[in-house]
Image (cartoon, rainbow, N blue to C red):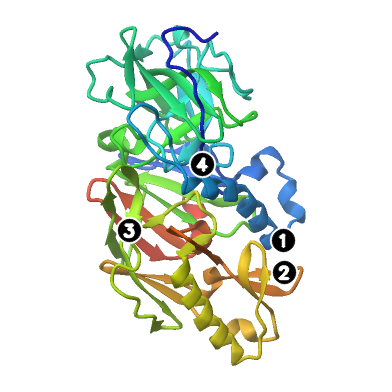
Amino acid sequence: MAKTSHLLPFHILLVLFLSRISLATTANVTSEKGLSFQLLYSDSIHDPSLYANLTTFQRLERIIQSSESYFQWLRRSSYNTTVIRPRILPHMGIFTVVLSIGTPPGTKAFTLALNTGDSLTWTQCIPCNPSFPQTQPMFDPSKSPSYRFLPITSPLCHPPYQIQNNKCIYNIQYLDQTGAVGFLSTETFTFHASPPRTIQSIPNLVFGCTHSSHMNFVGEPSGILGMDRSRLSFVSQVTSQTTNGSFSYCLFRPSTASAGILRFGNDIVMSGPLQRTPIINVPNSNRYHLELNDISIDNQRLHLPARTFEVTEIDSGTVITRLIRPVYALVREVLVQYFNHFHLVPFPRPPFDLCYHLSPGIRRFFPNMTWHLRDADLAIHAEELFFIVEHNNDFCLGMVPDDHLTILGVLQQYNTRFSYDLQTNQLRFKHEDCSDDMGNL
């Protein structure tokens, strides 16, 4: 569809998303209010043979390279009341989920990039001009009897969404000069389960029907699945039907094409002692913020001054954990002194700042780290704190400094189940072998 007067002007600025990790091809409804999606690394979807000849660290390098653009723009992105500027880079993004939109004869299956930093779920719709190439046919709203425009009286139709020609319009503008423009609409979403399990359909979900797009997607995905804390996000909308306002994931290192499972609602199983910390409200942000108070290395606290960390995030879109520079400098100093006892000489190995040659037997002496959050301690085991560069026989600290942000990235989330509860604004977590979760899909 050519640009017409009922669409907002299409000024595009940036976007962010994640670590070339990608989400699955099957969704299983395993309980009355539950849903599960298998996670895969995105490269394996397009080329399953790619992973066969890569070491674990080489796979990590591919993920890191992809997510760096996401992070560089993360700190620069901003919001205002007239356009949507999500802090996620979709073409880097890349948890994906397969689902269907519409009802017969207009039902279509789509692969959407899961985006924990965005609210709106959207896909390209016929007619769409300009558009990006996608593998699946575009959604045709004229062929689905359940398709409706979102009424302009809806409480969800408010800034940054606008009313034009008696329709609610969105204009997503990303800072890399990509974006999407279209109508807020409602439609039935269907999640396909593997036999003998059933198919679950949820009617009247609000999504964006995009009629003009400039994105860097090619083939897949065909849009975004918004998963932030706002009222419009997917997890918020389906709270009463499926999710109980909660979702979780348990990731493991990219030694195979699989990455873990994304679970919703009653499909989340966490037994035994759990750590719990509040998700903090930050003005003008629906991302997942935590209160970090101190750090320990080898069970020794650093005794950082109060309010050292103004804002700390947990993010599935940032691969390498970021520490604000003064804290990183102290962490680095403690680790250098620690490894001096083993006569190891530090050196940088981009993107990492602190690396060592792997001397015989040193791995059993790797220290651990603990993040002391409000009411909880997040243990970062040595296996997740340091990463082995197999082909060079080196190891590196999986964290880097940043001038502004502290973010718990994917590298330090491996083998810990994180459960996000949007109803209680609480993050629960527990260390476990995430590869065991694959047998429970």
Along the horizontal axis of the image, is 45 left or right of 15?
right
Identify the residue at image location x=66%, y=86%. 344
The image shows residue 300 at horizontal and vertical percentages of 40, 84
Real-space Cα distance between discs 1 and 4? 27 Å
- Under tag 4, what secondary structure? loop
Real-space Cα distance between discs 4 and 2? 30 Å
Q: Label 4 is placed on what type of residue?
A: Leu
- Under tag 3, what secondary structure? strand
In primary-sequence order, the first of circles 1 and 2 is 1
The image shows residue 364 at horizontal and vertical percentages of 58, 84
In primary-sequence order, the first of circles 4 and 2 is 4
Nearest to the eye among marks 4 and 2: give it.
4
Q: Residue 55 carries which label?
A: 1
In primary-sequence order, the first of circles 1 and 4 is 4
Nearest to the eye among marks 1 and 4: give it.
4
Q: Which residue lies under the disc numbered 4?
A: 16
Q: Which residue lies under the disc numbered 2?
A: 390
Q: Which residue lies under the disc numbered 3?
A: 290
